[in-house]
Image (spheres, rainbow, N blue to C red):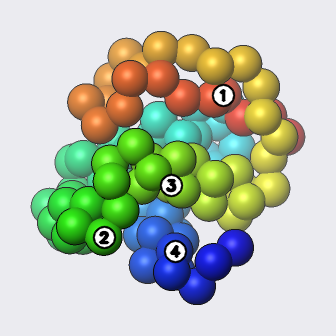
Amino acid sequence: MSNKTTEIEELVQRALASIPNHYNPDIIELVFLEIENDPILFQDYIALQKIFVKKALNVWIAKYTKKITGMQSGTRVQAKRSKLIGSYTRLFV
């Protein structure tokens, strides 16, 4: 993956560090919830929007969540808890 997205990968790693069950099928939504609810992560997310458009940033966050957890894509569902995304792909081991 591109070096330009290293900061996104680091953001995902920091968010995942606060989530006890990395293998939850809703891990992508949980990462966005963690970013949304943690003031420092959210500030970094907003800063990254100055480099990447929101849609691209969110796609990269999902890709890195999948890569870091080593999970596989499942079905696409509507996000019910996070305000940062409208939908996400559930992941499975």
Task: Report helix, strand or loop for mark 1.
Answer: strand
Q: Quadrant of residue 65?
A: bottom right
Task: Report helix, strand or loop for mark 3.
Answer: helix
| Amino acid tagged 3 | Ile
| Amino acid tagged 4 | Thr
If you read the primary sequence from the N terminus, does the residue marked by circle 1 or circle 2 appear first? 2
Q: Residues within 10 Å of mark 2 (few under 14, many from 20)?
A: few
Q: In this image, 85 relative to 50: left or right?
A: right
Q: Residues within 10 Å of mark 3 (few under 14, many from 20)?
A: many
| Amino acid tagged 2 | Ile
Q: CA distance from mark 1 to mark 4?
A: 22 Å
| Amino acid tagged 1 | Arg
Q: CA distance from mark 3 to mark 4?
A: 9 Å
Q: Which mark is residue 66?
A: none
Q: Which residue is mark 4?
A: 5
Q: CA distance from mark 4 to mark 2?
A: 10 Å
Q: Residues within 10 Å of mark 1 (few under 14, many from 20)?
A: many
Residue 71, percent from left and from top: 80, 46
Between tags 1 and 4, which lies in front?
4
Between tags 1 and 3, which lies in front?
3
Quadrant assignment for the N terminus: bottom right
Q: Which mark is residue 61?
A: 3
Residue 93, percent from left and from top: 85, 40
Residue at (38% x, 23% y) in the render? 86
If you read the primary sequence from the N terminus, does the residue marked by circle 1 or circle 4 appear first? 4
Q: Which residue is mark 1?
A: 90
Residue at (26% x, 60% y) in the render? 49
If you read the primary sequence from the N terminus, does the residue marked by circle 3 or circle 4 appear first? 4
Q: Which residue is mark 2?
A: 51
Task: Report helix, strand or loop for mark 4.
Answer: helix
